């Protein structure tokens, strides 16, 4: 029988050939929890399993990324609860100095093609960018998986998204992603796996693929894959530890798709999501001139090297507008070091930006800044729900648009700079 | 596996114009201001406390009641409290055309039946379903009945491990049963 990517991965991890709609037990290659959710996992675990060992200490990790280093006592306590449990059990902690868990997993080779990973992060499906099936779950689920290395899963059907046409040279991967969010909304791929095809997505770099796959969560999808590789991406992936391209999974000829959706991106320019929904997306011309107070570049969607290079290229050492602040938070320590070596951090700082240690930063109510009532923020994050980053209003855009807007003090297209 | 039959009075979550409310997220179900609570008993009072028009739900609901909502119920965060608050009130089931993926799992794992019934909206528009009607739901066969109006409908049944988890009273109980 011909299978889609998700069907193959679940089949390989359940010892049977699966069909959409079936509920199966799936074996897990990695089980994780973060500083949110993690403490509850520890609590449940101790109550249910006492001091029984986790299923495999080499395949269980904690990643702290939400509030790092802890700036509230609550988080400090929670992180310590997790640390002590991990020590007792003998598994690894990627502590407050490491950065966003999902990205660390990719960099460290813990998540790779064909693998299955679950954790308490609702954006864990970002791992689709490297051909891995990642899935966010609640703390009861994760506790059970800590102990058993398994989870039950209802096999999703797959939607094929054909991206047609050539975007304009001003469009970055985030613009493409926001446009797909707008086109697919929260209904078209809800509870389904997505396979993205077409020249515009095949051309994406690894960082660009991470941007796209991270926002499948906002499309209400289960996971997104970009099956077609290009040379640069292959080279980048092969440089990752433990990454074996032999395990790269493509769907079979004749695999069954729930639906095939075409999205035309011809001539696409910069896109902006307006408050308070990530799929309320406009061409930048429609919101141009909106005054801003703050910019944020970072998050699991746009915290990679390429994103900061893009921003630095727009800033080119110019000063950001007086009265505006720009917060820059690299996704991981590795990204941070690389940007440091390339001189990018220096150039960001010379422009007046704040550069903080890696983590989720200004995406959630984390360690780098909330917005106050009436404050207008332009962010490279993935969610602009009311209250997510404080009481202000958040617009979502690419690193280039955020950088340009911070120079101008208002939302503006990079071509105007 | 034996059938589980649920029967109860329903609350249809509609807005002021009478439309079924879609995309009710976990913040509307259980506000993040109360995330620090760990005692399930205390959570009931905040159920739907952030959903416009339904802030008084916790006072109105009785054990055994059934909640009916629009598509994508429980979108958003993975917080377990958004499930536990209904369990605290003794809510017997939640019915909606679809649920957020994580919410659905959390509910099954806590043995709260989350019923996927695609045609809820049509039934409400056709006046075949109103708040306070009694619904009967057979989980393993997917047979539903509006008892007041003597009308039958079908929903997605529970099978295999999902049904077993609900029957056992949740994922942890289920796992302990397997070990025994
Ligand atoms: S950056 Fe934001 S969306 Fe991504 S994992 Fe962190 S908190 Fe979640």
Image: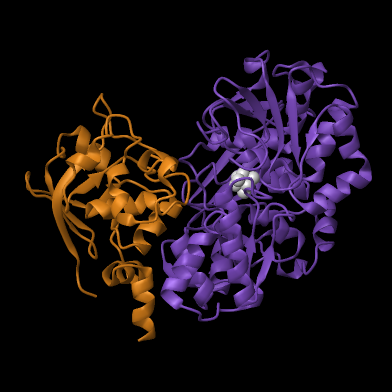
Q: Residue A315: in sight, yes or no?
A: yes
Image colouring: by chain
Task: From the viewer's perspective, tell me whether residue A412 is left or right of residue B22.
Answer: right
Q: Colour of chain B?
A: orange
Question: What residue sits 37% from the left and 69% below the top?
Answer: B171
Instruction: Give how far across and how far down residue A313 sits, in percent.
Output: 87, 31
* The chain coloured purple in the image: A
Instruction: Give how far across and how far down residue A35 sits, in percent.
Output: 59, 56
Q: Which quadrant would residue A103 be assigned to in this image?
A: bottom right
Residue situated in front as seen by the camera: A12 or A355: A355
Task: From the viewer's perspective, tell me whether residue A265 is left or right of residue A14.
Answer: right
Q: Residue A123: in sight, yes or no?
A: no
Residue extending farthest to the top is A289
Residue situated in front as seen by the camera: A22 or A347: A347
Q: How many circles with numbers are drawn on the protein?
A: 0
Task: From the viewer's perspective, tell me whether residue A317 is left or right of residue A171.
Answer: right
Instruction: Give how far across and how far down residue A404 sits, in percent.
Output: 78, 23
Q: Please, is residue B58 above or below residue B115 in the view?
A: above
Instruction: Give how far across and how far down residue A385 sits, in percent.
Output: 52, 33
């Amino acid at each position: 029988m011909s299978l889609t990517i998700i069907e193959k991965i679940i089949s390989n991890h359940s010892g049977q050939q699966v069909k959409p709609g079936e509920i199966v037990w799936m074996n897990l290659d990695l089980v994780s929890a973060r500083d949110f959710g993690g403490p509850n996992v520890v609590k449940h675990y101790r109550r249910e399993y006492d001091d029984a060992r986790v299923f495999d200490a080499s395949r269980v990790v904690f990643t702290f990324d939400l509030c790092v280093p802890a700036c509230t006592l609550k988080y400090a306590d929670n992180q310590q609860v997790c640390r002590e449990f991990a020590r007792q059990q003998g598994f690894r902690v990627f502590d407050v100095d490491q950065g966003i868990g999902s990205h660390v997993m990719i960099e460290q080779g813990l998540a790779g093609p064909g693998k299955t990973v679950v954790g308490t992060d609702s954006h864990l499906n970002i791992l689709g960018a490297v051909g891995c099936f990642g899935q966010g779950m609640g703390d009861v689920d994760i506790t059970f998986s800590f102990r058993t290395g398994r989870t039950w899963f209802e096999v999703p059907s797959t939607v094929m998204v054909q991206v047609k046409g050539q975007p304009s040279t001003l469009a970055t991967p985030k613009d493409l992603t926001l446009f797909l969010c707008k086109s697919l909304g929260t209904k078209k791929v809800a509870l389904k796996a997505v396979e993205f095809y077409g020249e515009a997505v095949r051309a994406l770099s690894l960082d660009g693929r991470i941007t796209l796959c991270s926002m499948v969560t906002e499309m209400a999808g289960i996971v997104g894959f970009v099956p077609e590789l290009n040379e640069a991406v292959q080279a980048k992936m092969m440089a990752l530890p433990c990454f074996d391209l032999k395990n790269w999974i493509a769907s079979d000829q004749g695999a069954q798709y729930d639906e095939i959706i075409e999205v035309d991106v011809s001539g696409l320019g910069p896109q902006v999501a307006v408050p308070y929904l990530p799929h309320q997306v406009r061409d930048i011309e429609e919101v141009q001139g909106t005054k801003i107070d703050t910019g944020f570049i970072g998050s699991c969607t746009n915290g990679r090297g390429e994103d900061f290079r893009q921003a630095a290229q727009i800033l080119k050492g110019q000063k950001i507008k007086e009265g505006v602040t720009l917060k820059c938070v690299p996704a991981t320590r590795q990204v941070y070091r690389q940007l440091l070596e390339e001189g990018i951090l220096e150039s960001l700082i010379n422009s007046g930006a704040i550069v903080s240690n890696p983590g989720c930063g200004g995406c959630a109510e984390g360690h780098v800044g909330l917005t106050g009532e009436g404050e207008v923020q332009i962010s490279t994050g993935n969610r602009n729900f009311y209250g997510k980053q404080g009481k202000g209003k958040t617009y979502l855009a690419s690193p280039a648009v955020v950088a340009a807007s911070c120079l101008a003090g208002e939302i503006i297209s990079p071509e105007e700079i | 596996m034996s059938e589980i039959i649920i029967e109860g009075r329903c609350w249809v979550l509609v807005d002021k114009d009478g439309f079924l409310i879609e995309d009710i997220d976990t913040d509307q179900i259980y506000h993040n201001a109360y995330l620090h609570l760990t005692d399930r008993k205390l959570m009931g009072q905040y159920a739907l406390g952030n959903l416009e028009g339904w802030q008084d739900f916790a006072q109105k609901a009785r054990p055994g009641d059934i909640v009916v909502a629009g598509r994508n119920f429980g979108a958003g965060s993975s917080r377990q409290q958004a499930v536990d608050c209904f369990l605290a009130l003794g809510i017997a089931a939640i019915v909606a055309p679809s649920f957020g993926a994580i919410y659905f799992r959390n509910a099954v794992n806590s043995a709260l039946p989350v019923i996927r019934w695609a045609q809820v909206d049509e039934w409400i528009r056709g006046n075949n379903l109103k708040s306070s009607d009694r619904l009967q739901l057979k989980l393993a066969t997917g047979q539903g009945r509006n008892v007041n109006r003597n009308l039958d409908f079908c929903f997605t049944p529970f099978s295999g491990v999902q049904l077993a988890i609900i029957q056992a009273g949740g994922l942890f109980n289920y796992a302990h049963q397997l070990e025994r």
